[in-house]
Every structure is written in structure tokens, then in C-alpha cells.
Image: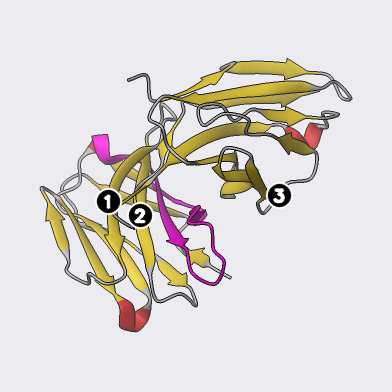
Amino acid sequence: NAGVTQTPKFQVLKTGQSMTLQCAQDMNHEYMSWYRQDPGMGLRLIHYSVGAGITDQGEVPNGYNVSRSTTEDFPLRLLSAAPSQTSVYFCASSTRLAGIYNEQFFGPGTRLTVL
Amino acid sequence: AQKVTQAQTEISVVEKEDVTLDCVYETRDTTYYLFWYKQPPSGELVFLIRRNSFDEQNEISGRYSWNFQKSTSSFNFTITASQVVDSAVYFCALSEGGWGGSYIPTFGRGTSLIVHP
């Protein structure tokens, strides 16, 4: 199992550019989520999905879009990059087994700089 | 709404000292889950423990122990005889599914632990 994979690992954008951060998992997890990590702010939830075709907003969704057409993939789109979106982005997946919610598995992160 | 507070922003200790990282949570749900993750300087997020709200047993794993107290809404993490390799940022997280919750965890801001040799 590859677990949760994220691409790219590093990205530099100019203000106004758009891009997609890719996230994939091979564990057949129904839950997937995107967080951003900024110094002193912990991990803040951007968007999440509880299954294919179902997405919802988290704490800081503005400027980002997501879709979940398959169980495996959960891409995060930056519509028009702004310097405030400079951050480290983590994708995670998780599942419930026998009614118990289990821990999240995290990807390695994408370090994004917007100039 | 669910909330996690890690009041200690940074803790500095000398090797072999014991250290406790505090985590206080808020939830309206009766069924919820608490987690601790470790983020070493390399940046990956490493799962340490999950605790269910219906299981208040404390847990010990080697030098690590966790104290879950529903009466004070706390889930504290103690490292005994700390080592330099324990230097990392530690996150506490809360997951709830009732009241229309999604189970997606909310994280605290993290505590940076620095262990000096």
C-alpha cells in the first residue's frame, strides 16, 4: 500500500495563478480531508469529503475548491492564488470500522509559496 | 462546535525530565474520539493514540502515557524520561459524529517540545 500520496511536494506560484494539488489514497477510505498548516495555527480544515460525490466546507474554505469523483482521489484547486495561501497543505484519509472512527493517515504534505 | 485547546505553545526541557502536554476539549457529543499526533522536524504527521469517549482507561506505551478525564474534558500526554528524539510538535485532535458531525477531526494549535541534551 502506498497510503496517502500528494503531488507536488513543492510549488511556487505567482499571484493570480491557479493550480491543483493532487491527493490519492489506496486504502478504500471513505473520509478524506485537506488541511493547511501555518506557524502557530495548527492544522486548519479546508474541505472534506465523507464519500465519493460528497464534499463540504471546513473552517477555511475560501479560495479553494474540491471534488470527489472517485473514492481514491481528492484534488484541491486553488482558483486564483494569493500570498495568504502560502502554507503547507496536508491531505488525509480515514475510515470507520465496526462503527468506530479510526485515525487519519496523512500524506507527506505540499509546501506552497505564492509570490 | 468542537474545539481543542493546547495552551502550551512551547515547552523546553532537559533530557531525562518528565514532561506533560495538556489538551482540553469541548464537545456537545456523547460519542467522540481524541487523538494525539507527533510532527517531528522532518514534517510528517505520525499518529500516536486514539481514545474513544466511552473508554476512560488511561494508557501507557513505553515512555508515553495518556490521561483521559471526561470530568475535566482533558486528554493529557506525558513523556517520561524525555529524549532528544522526542523533540517535535505534538497535536491533540477531536472527532465527533453526532449533531450532524462529520467525524473529521479538529486539531489544536500544537505544542512544540524541545528536549535539550
Viewed as shown, does residue A19 lie left or right of B11? Answer: right
Q: Residues within 10 Å of mark 3 (few under 14, many from 20)?
A: few
Residue A74: percent from the left, percent from the top?
A: 59, 30
Whole-Å distance between the Cαs marked 3 and 2? 22 Å
Is the residue at mark 2 from the same chain as the one at mark 1?
Answer: yes
The kind of secondary structure element at disc 1 is strand
Kindly identify which numbered label has been placed on residue B49.
1
Is the residue at mark 3 from the same chain as the one at mark 1?
Answer: no
Is the residue at mark 3 from the same chain as the one at mark 2?
Answer: no
Q: Quadrant of the N terminus of chain B?
A: bottom right
Residue under the point 80% across and 39% down? A63
Residue B24: percent from the left, percent from the top?
A: 42, 70
Q: Which three-letter amino acid code belongs to the residue tagged 2?
A: Phe
Q: Which residues are magenta?
A: B85-112
Q: Chain of mark 2?
A: B
**Sequence-first tag of 2 and 1:** 2
> Disc 2 marks which residue?
B35
* Residue B21 seen anywhere in this rendered image of the structure: yes
Residue A24: percent from the left, percent from the top?
A: 51, 24
Viewed as shown, does residue A99 lie left or right of B59? Answer: right
The kind of secondary structure element at disc 2 is strand
Residue A36: percent from the left, percent from the top?
A: 61, 40
> Disc 3 marks which residue?
A60
Residue under the point 87% across and 24% down? A15
A28 shown above or below B104: above
The quadrant holding residue B66 is: bottom left
